[in-house]
């Protein structure tokens, strides 16, 4: 798959995923898609908690979010309306330290440039997160544009993108 929107960088001990997408709405109109629980659930997953700077959040990727890998949680460290946010991200109780997700928004001709950087990931974990963010950002674009999502269920799409990211290493 040659049309990946992201790049995967590795140092000796950590990986970083960076994805960029131009979405056809102004930053102020994109902001609720990233911060309103009802809108997040339409393209991402159910998110609960204090979706504000300093607030803790929890993402339930599956109905039974007690299963390993079915939930993530963290704290929103920075939140600037219409500009971006930074949060910690933890997916398992036994992870040594949370990773960091930074989302930046900037007005450009034709809409908003969204840049998502997920850093502090272990090798292997970075490929899976790159594929996951790829699927979710494609779903966000389809949601905003009112078009169908990519063909296939979420896990089929994730596996296609995971294999494509793995091939870039």
Image (tube, grey):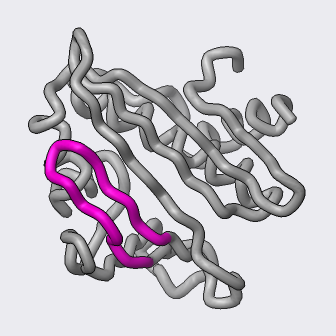
Camera-side residue: 59 or 120?
120
Q: Which residues are magenta?
A: 74-88
Picture quadrant where residue 142 is located: top left
Q: Is residue 49 magenta?
A: no
Q: Is residue 81 left or right of residue 103?
A: left
Q: Position of residue 61 (x, y in %)?
A: 45, 66
Q: Is residue 130 above or below residue 146?
A: below
Q: Is residue 100 left or right of residue 39?
A: right
Labels in figure, total: 0
Picture quadrant where residue 130 is located: top right
Q: Is residue 57 above or below residue 85?
A: below
Camera-side residue: 71 or 96?
96
Q: Is residue 79 above or below residue 55?
A: above
Picture quadrant where residue 78 is located: bottom left
Magenta span dominant secondary structure? strand
Q: Position of residue 81 (x, y in %)?
A: 15, 51
């Amino acid at each position: 798959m040659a049309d990946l929107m992201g790049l995967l960088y590795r140092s000796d001990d950590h990986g970083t995923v960076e994805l960029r997408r131009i979405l056809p709405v102004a930053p102020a109109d994109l902001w609720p898609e990233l911060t309103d629980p009802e809108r997040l659930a339409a393209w991402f997953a159910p998110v609960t908690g204090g979706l504000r700077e300093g607030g803790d959040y929890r993402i339930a990727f599956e109905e039974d979010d007690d299963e390993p890998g079915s939930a993530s949680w963290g704290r929103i460290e920075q939140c600037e309306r219409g500009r971006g946010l930074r949060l910690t991200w933890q997916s398992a109780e036994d992870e040594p330290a949370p990773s960091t997700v930074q989302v930046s928004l900037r007005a450009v001709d034709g809409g908003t440039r969204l840049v998502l950087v997920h850093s502090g990931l272990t090798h292997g974990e970075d490929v899976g997160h790159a594929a996951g963010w790829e699927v979710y950002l494609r779903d966000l674009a389809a949601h905003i544009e009112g078009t169908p999502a990519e063909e296939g269920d979420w896990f089929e799409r994730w596996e296609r993108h995971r294999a494509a990211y793995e091939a870039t290493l």
